[in-house]
Image (cartoon, rainbow, N blue to C red):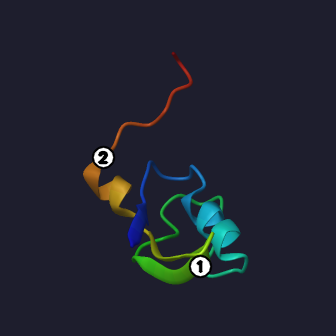
Amino acid sequence: MTEVIAGAPNVGKSTLTNLLAQRSVVIVSSTPGTTRDVVEVSLNLGGYHVRLADTAVAARLRLPRHTGDR
């Protein structure tokens, strides 16, 4: 199964990828736009083979940013 991590810039997509991979596979920075290419990693999550893709796609799609308002 392939899962994609996508979202607004600087919300922790790369940090989540590294956490799930249990190693540093993606550069993490406080500078928006650090991830420019899709970075894929193969994982075993709970016995499931998962290909995880960390993307910068949200910046190109202009997804709304969470403002904290509910």
Can residue 6 be seen by looking at this rendering? yes
Residue beneath label 2, please? 62
Position of the N terminus, as image quadrant, is: bottom left
Q: Position of residue 21 (x, y in %)?
A: 65, 76
Q: Quadrant of residue 22?
A: bottom right
Residue sitting nearer the eye, 45 or 3: 45
Q: Quadrant of residue 38?
A: bottom left
- Give the number of the mark in front: 1 or 2: 1
**Neighbourhood count class around disc 2 (C-alpha, 10 Å): few under 14, some 14–19, many 20 upward:** few
Residue beneath label 1, please? 44
Tag 2: residue type?
Arg
Is label 2 in a helix, a strand or a loop?
Answer: loop
Q: Position of residue 42 (x, y in %)?
A: 52, 84
Residue 31, placed above or below residue 48 = above
Residue sitting nearer the eye, 5 or 10: 5
Q: Which mark is residue 11?
A: none
**Neighbourhood count class around disc 1 (C-alpha, 10 Å): few under 14, some 14–19, many 20 upward:** few
Q: Residue at x 51, y 15 (%)?
A: 70
Q: Position of residue 7 (x, y in %)?
A: 43, 50
Q: Residue at x 42, y 73 (%)?
A: 36
Query: Considering only order in the chain, which callout, 2 or 1, is on the residue closer to the N terminus?
Result: 1
Residue 60, placed above or below residue 37 = above
Q: Position of residue 26 (x, y in %)?
A: 59, 77
Is label 1 in a helix, a strand or a loop?
Answer: strand
Q: Residue at x 62, y 82 (%)?
A: 25
Instruction: Give the alpha-carbon distance from disc 1 to disc 2, as whole Å.
Output: 31 Å
